[in-house]
Amino acid sequence: MSEPAALRIDPHVHSAASYDGHDPVELLLEQASEIGLDGIVVTDHDEIEASLRAAALAPDYGLVGIPGVEVSTAAGHLLAIGVEERPPPGRPFDETVATVRDAGGAAVVPHPFQRTRHGVRRRHIGDCDGIEVYNAWLFTGYRNRRARRFAAARGLPGVAASDAHHARYIGRAFTEVAVPGARRGAVDGDDVVAALADGNGSVHGRRQPIPRSAQHYLSGAGRKGAWTAARVGRRAPELVQGLLGDG
């Protein structure tokens, strides 16, 4: 029997479509290809259009195309990997996981327990397809170790990701996914998503330098405030109409 195809995937990357992202998907794909990854998942915050574009363009860069989104649930953030439609934000955690699975995707909890980053708390994490046990944007290894212990205790697959917000940080952490019974060149995004959900992945990576992480948190907080204000402004007529009613 042939060895399973092993692909290096960074499943948590942000583009300029996120309030805290910077680079267009073309630059992200180019960087991923140059450093030897086999694919990335662009997981912008509650936005999926850029990710769909990245997945469509990925083969042009020799990469596997996998769409996704980082959706805001009522309990915290959730990576919806392999979906082509954004799950509605603000819904209960378990309901969102079910929506992701119904769409053929894998539901992975990113940076768990970190309230400053909207991580889902331990008591709210129910059934899911994986836990991000290595996130490159942590100040220390404590949170990663805690996530790893939690995943092991629950029997949940562990995932590693860069959580990159600039192209140059892509691949700083990644998941090597083994796809049984497939030739390397014949693997598609559905194969990778299924392998992730089945726990056929191993984690690799290193943390960002602490000064860079601190700068990232501070600048991200400012951009998030501006992004939220802009979204509220765009929805103002809708909100007013909702308050006034149809009459």
Image (cartoon, helix red, strand yellow):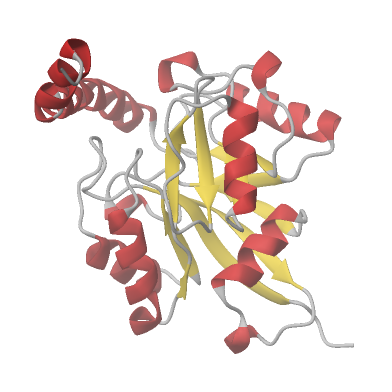
Q: How far across and how far down the image is residue 59, in percent?
A: 40, 81
Front residue of 91/35: it is 91
Q: How far across and how far down the image is residue 199, in percent?
A: 76, 53
56 displayed left or right of 3:
left
77 displayed left or right of 57:
right
- 41 vs 17: above or below: below
Front residue of 130/240: it is 240
Q: Residue at x 53, y 30 (%)?
A: 111
Q: Residue at x 64, y 50 (%)?
A: 101
Q: Quadrant of residue 88?
A: top left
Count the numbered circles shown: 0
Q: How far across and how far down the image is residue 115, in percent?
A: 48, 15
- 57 vs 146: above or below: below
Q: Quadrant of the N terminus?
A: bottom right
Q: Is residue 205 visible?
A: no
162 displayed left or right of 184:
left
Q: Residue at x 55, y 70 (%)?
A: 189
